[in-house]
Structures are given as C-alpha cells and as structure tokens.
Image (cartoon, rainbow, N blue to C red):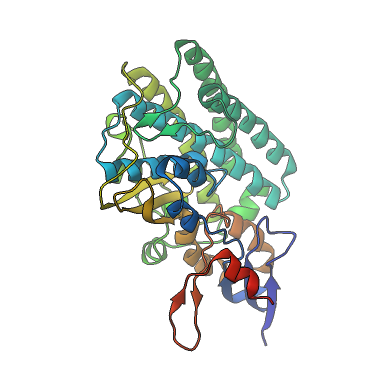
Amino acid sequence: MTFIIPVGPQHPALLEPEHFRFEVKGEEIVDVGIRLGYMHRGIERGLSERTYHQGLYLAERICGICSHSHNLCFAQTVERLAEVEVPDRAEYIRAIVAELERIHSHLLWAGVAAHEIGFITLFMLFWRDREHVQDLLELTTGNRCYYSMCALGGVRRDIRPEHLLKLKRGLKVLEKATKHYVDVATSDRTILARCENVGVLTKRDARDLCAVGPTARASGVDRDMRRDDPYASYPEIPFEVAVQPEGDVLARVVVRLREVLEAINIIREALKKMPTGPIRTKFKPEIPPNQATVRIEAPRGELLHFGISNGTNKPERWRARTPTYANFAALKPMFVGGSIAEIPIVLASIDPCMCCTDRVTLVEVATGKSRVLTMEELRRIPK
C-alpha cells in the first residue's frame, strides 16, 4: 500500500514555493509529481516593454545569485542583435566577474547543502569564506549583489592596478580554504553517510533529461558552454572542466568545489593576459529587425537568452531559459528509490532557483488557445 506525502508549496524545508507529491511505500519513494509556477513574475513581458538599456537592470533581477550571468547573457544577446563588437579588455573583465560570481554561488550553495544535512559548523565556514568573495566583487564592481557590471558594448567599470594585489590575496585565501573543503567533503563520515550513493542520476538519464551544469557534470556528462560555445575571453584562457562519474549528491558537491578551484585559476590567468585598451564601444539604441540566441555557463548550468528586435529601442520578444528549468526533469530519477529523509538534500543538490525558473501561460480550457492579459484584466478576474 502506498501513501501520498505533499511537500510544499509552503514548507519549512523549501526556501521558495514549489509543490511535490511523493508517493511512498513505507520510507521508500516510489513516484513523485512536481508542480511549478508559484513564483511567476512576468519578467519576460517586462523586458519587451523596456528599452535595451533598461532591460540590462531588469535582466539582472531574474536571479539575485546569478545576476551577472543574466546581465552578461542579456548584453551579449543585444550585442549580437545589433552586430556590435566588444573591446577585448571588456571581455576579460566580464569573464573575471563571471568567475567571481561562480565562486560566490558555489560557496553559498555548499553552505546550504551543509545546513540541509545538519552540519551547521561547515555551513558557517562556507558562508564565512563567501564573505571574502563578496568583498572581491564589491572591490571590482562596486556592489555586493546585483553588480551591474555589463554595459551594452562593454563594461561600466575598469579593474584598476591598485585592485590587483587585493584580488590576488583574496584568491589565495579562497584557494587554501577550498582545498580543505574538498578534503572534508571526501573524508568526513557525516557527509559521506548523507551524500554518498544518495540521489543518483545516471549518465544516460542526465543526457536523456537534458540536465545541465554541475548536475550533468557530476553524472559524467562532459559539457560546459565556456568551452563548447565559448564567449567573453574564455577562448583565450585554458581551463579544465570538472567532471565526476558517480552521479550522486557527493559528486555534485565535489564538482562544485573543483569548479571553485578552477575559477580561481581562470581569474589569475585572465588578470595575467588582460590587454590594455578601451572597455566600452558606442552603441545605438535602435536595433534593426533581427533575432539572436546566446548561451553561457551560469553557476547552475547553461543559461539561454533569446531576443527578437524590431527596429526600435525595445525588443519585440524576449525569452530566458534558466538552468533550474532544465534540471527539474532530472529530479524524478534522483528521488525514486530513495527515502523520505533524503528529500531535502537531493532537492538542494541541483541548487534550485524558483524565482528565475517559473513561467505561466494562461490557456482557455474550451479552445486550448493561450491568452495575454493586462494587469487590469488580471485584477478583474477574482471579482
């Protein structure tokens, strides 16, 4: 006999609203249904109602943790629509900020994962070192969150010579700490008991379900947009893609910590190779009719922005496909066969972000056709 256990949309274990219906037999999960859409904010519609310059700021707010990734992906899509070339120095600065953001995101996630398994001391240590990265981001961009670094045609701020020493010192501190965390993650009995052979996603399932980012790479899928569809200054910087074959929660922890170490190496190489020159080129606000798609490797995985221009200073249509949306289908094989106690850490292992994922389409039941409503029409519906 099986029972249904609903989790969410409001639940102490969930930082954002999502709804799961777990079918369980005793303690074993035999099936799961997932329902999304509670965090829809209408950002895609908002982007098509604002100028390209205004859209840069709104795109950042798709996700607070990955704000530079959306800022960068939006800027690159607009630049491709307008066929604008970005100065080389700006490309390097964009990559440096992207890697600082990756370090910040992974350390933040590692702290959350430690909290989910009851390892509060490790949670505090991860978030202590996260502060070091935020200090470096503030030094480089002027902000600790929503960095607003990209401009259309380049970047807003340069990395000054007096920043270099502080950046190098900060990276050294982070490198030492992260190497210690890798040792802890692969040897501590608490972590191994809660993460090893838990939430397994096979390589075949990862490919078939189109998993992306660390979730896919932890299942042996060697895919990274920085290498496979290079952008910014990544073609000029050698780096190793972190891949683990096991496919369990522990592999996802190790992949992210290895990516932190590789991000440190990328930043050092970028600082060494970064050329002199301008950081921004001129950009005309009106863009001829065109369409473009850009993919980048955000901390959580492949991020895609698609835009259509119409000859004005506003896009005709904008679409953003976030990594969490791609990874949610992979949750079912991770859950099925596991126990109820594993639900929090398995869910956390894909580093979900619902506020950037959820989309809503209004469909007429009688006709099957979708509708677009104004805010005033939405207000009238409950009446």
- Judge left or right: residue 167 versus residue 188: left
- In percent of width and height, residue 379 lies at 64, 69
Quadrant location of the C terminus?
A: bottom right
- In percent of width and height, residue 279 lies at 36, 23
Q: Is residue 246 visible?
A: no
Q: Residue 139 falls in which quadrant of the image? A: top right
- Judge left or right: residue 202 versus residue 339: left
- Between 64 and 381, the one nearer to me in the picture: 381
Q: Is residue 7 above or below residue 249?
A: below
Q: Residue at x 59, y 42 (%)?
A: 185
- Between 225 and 63, the one nearer to me in the picture: 63
Q: Is residue 315 above or below residue 148?
A: below
Q: Is residue 340 visible?
A: yes
Q: Residue at x 43, y 29 (%)?
A: 96
- In percent of width and height, residue 34 lies at 57, 71
Count of numbered labels shown in the rendering: 0
- Judge left or right: residue 52 versus residue 343: left
Q: Residue 382 falls in which quadrant of the image? A: bottom right
Q: Is residue 99 above or below residue 42?
A: above
- Between 173 and 36, the one nearer to me in the picture: 36
- In percent of width and height, residue 145 lies at 59, 35
Quadrant location of the N terminus?
A: bottom right
